[in-house]
């Protein structure tokens, strides 16, 4: 980092990401968080008592509410970390788990902590319906049930659905439905190829999840559940969702469950322990803009990160832009290409080379750490270099991280 104190990621792991109606979708997000928190330290022989600070992101509070408050503190204790371990629960929408990385980096830079962990955990399908007003009773009339998942709730306070903003702004940038469907198909195809090549195997970014059953052996989940075969015709037939002109179930990710965790420390500490860093953190920044620009915010945040790092886009071997919808990588790479058609194509070819959330899934709080580790593992396979990962989060917030392998 610019201040000369190098901070490295030494371990990064996630669970497979589930579909909506599967066994994994019954596991509380806190329990998924506990799984990755244990695994991420065990892999590198770091003891729970050695971790100073844990930041834990999740952004569907209604699901977390089933276990009441402070998921970070509960998960920290349930995972066997000592009672003295400091933790914080935070919600910066889909950005959350990168915000956790940023807070961890800050804590190390400030000298407040030496070994820090960033966690993201979410279980969208387990989100209960809410019955507002029921506590005071219902003297007469119908009881209203609210689904916090439907359109992600933004309309309640007068904001547009994310799908509508993303679709409308994509069209303004000349990114039409067909281009979004083609990106979605590409995401599925790139993921399938990468998986067949063994890139999503247990032991790298993935850990297995064992689900105990009353009778018989546990069910073991070792693969992401939402990738599917599709084609342009099938994608074109799908109806648009949530008032969007372009977003469909095919060019959007499914809602699922999953957790991810990243362990960080100063490079000198990793060297002392004989740990080979997974990646060095070069810059990490946050940004925000007008809510409508949700598909553009990854581009703005990447620019900001490059400025902080003193690097150019051409220095980046690979780019990850979270596929909240296909509109995000398309609009953001187009902005970054600054009107140069060939450059736009080149950037698209470097972006999400192993597929993205449209194939893998997007359990919102867990995705930002997921794209970061996907980037790190792929850079490592390719022999190293710089890479940038960026994600948008509700009402146009952004996070971006530049790493070097
Ligand atoms: C899009 C969404 C509404 C779909 O929910 P759903 O209706 O439960 O999803 P399904 O998986 O049943 O898909 C709906 C239909 O599309 C079809 N479909 C989905 N993906 C497809 C694909 N790639 N190719 C062809 N058909 C596809 C399904 O087969 C299903 O068809 P059917 O109705 O004939 O069974 C939901 O996943 C969602 O809201 N996703 C976006 C979440 C979000 O906003 N994330 C961003 C946060 S910033």
Image (cartoon, helix red, strand yellow):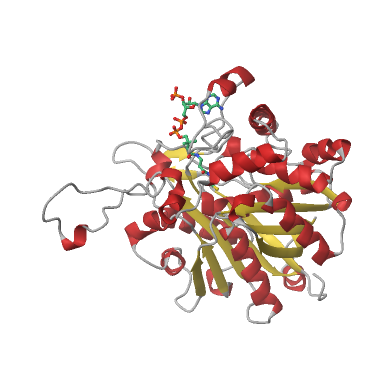
Q: Quadrant of the C terminus?
A: bottom right
Q: Residue at 49% across / 53% down in the picture? A: 159
Q: Relative to 167, is 344 on the left or the right?
A: right
Q: Where is residue 214 in the image (x, y as percent from the top left)?
A: 29, 41
Can residue 16 be seen?
A: no
The structure residue drawn at horizontal position 87% and vertical position 59%, both measured from the top left corner, is 311
Closest to the observer, 54 or 365: 365
Instruction: Decide if residue 276 is on the left or right side of residue 290.
Output: right
Vertical comparison of 250 with 328: above or below: above
Q: Residue 14: x percent and y percent?
A: 57, 50
Q: Nearer the viewer, residue 183 or 47?
A: 183
Q: Residue at x 62, y 60 (%)?
A: 98
The spot of residue 240 in percent (x, y) is 52, 31
- Extreme top residue here? 233
> Left or right of 401: which side holds 156?
left
Query: Does residue 362 lie above or below 261 as drawn?
Result: above
Quadrant placement of the N terminus: bottom right
Q: Is 23 on the left or on the right of 353, as rendered?
A: left
Q: Which residue is drawn at 37% across and 67% down?
A: 69
Q: What is the x, y in percent for residue 205?
A: 63, 47
| Residue occupying the far bottom of the picture | 111
Check the image and report above or below for 98 versus 228: below
- Residue 238 or 57: which is nearer the viewer? 238
């Amino acid at each position: 980092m610019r201040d000369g104190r190098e901070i490295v990621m030494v371990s990064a792991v996630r669970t497979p990401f589930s579909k909506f109606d599967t066994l994994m979708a019954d596991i509380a997000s806190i329990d998924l968080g506990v799984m990755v928190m244990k695994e991420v330290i065990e892999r590198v022989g770091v003891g729970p008592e050695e971790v100073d600070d844990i930041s834990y992101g999740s952004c569907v509070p209604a699901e977390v509410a089933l276990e009441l408050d402070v998921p970070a503190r509960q998960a920290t204790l349930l995972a066997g970390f000592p009672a003295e371990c400091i933790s914080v629960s935070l919600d910066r929408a889909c950005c959350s788990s990168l915000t956790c990385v940023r807070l961890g980096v800050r804590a190390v830079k400030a000298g407040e902590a030496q070994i820090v962990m960033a966690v993201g955990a979410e279980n969208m399908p387990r989100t209960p319906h809410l019955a507002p007003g029921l506590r005071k009773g219902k003297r007469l009339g119908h009881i209203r049930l609210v689904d916090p998942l439907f359109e992600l709730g933004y309309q309640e306070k007068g904001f547009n659905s994310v799908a509508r903003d993303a679709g409308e702004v994509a069209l303004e940038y000349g990114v039409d439905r067909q281009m979004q469907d083609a990106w979605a198909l590409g995401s599925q195809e790139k993921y399938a190829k990468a998986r067949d090549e063994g890139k999503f195997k247990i032991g790298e970014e993935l850990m297995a999840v064992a689900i105990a059953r009353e009778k018989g052996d546990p069910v073991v989940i070792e693969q992401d559940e939402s990738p599917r075969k599709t084609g342009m015709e099938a994608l074109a037939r799908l109806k648009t969702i949530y008032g969007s002109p372009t977003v469909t179930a095919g060019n959007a990710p499914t809602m699922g469950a999953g957790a991810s965790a990243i362990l960080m420390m100063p490079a000198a500490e990793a060297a002392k322990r004989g740990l080979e860093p997974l990646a060095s953190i070069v810059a990490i920044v946050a940004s925000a803009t007008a809510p409508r620009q949700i598909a553009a915010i990854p581009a703005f945040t990447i620019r900001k990160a490059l400025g902080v790092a003193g690097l150019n886009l051409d220095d980046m071997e690979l780019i990850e832009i979270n596929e909240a919808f296909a509109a995000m990588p398309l609009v953001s790479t187009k902005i970054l290409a600054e009107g140069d058609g060939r450059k736009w194509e080149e950037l698209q070819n470097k972006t999400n080379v192993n597929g993205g959330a449209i194939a893998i899934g997007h359990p919102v709080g867990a995705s930002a750490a997921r794209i970061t580790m996907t980037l790190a593992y792929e850079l490592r396979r390719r022999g190293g270099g710089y890479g940038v990962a960026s994600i948008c989060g509700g009402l146009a917030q952004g996070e971006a991280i530049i790493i070097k392998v």
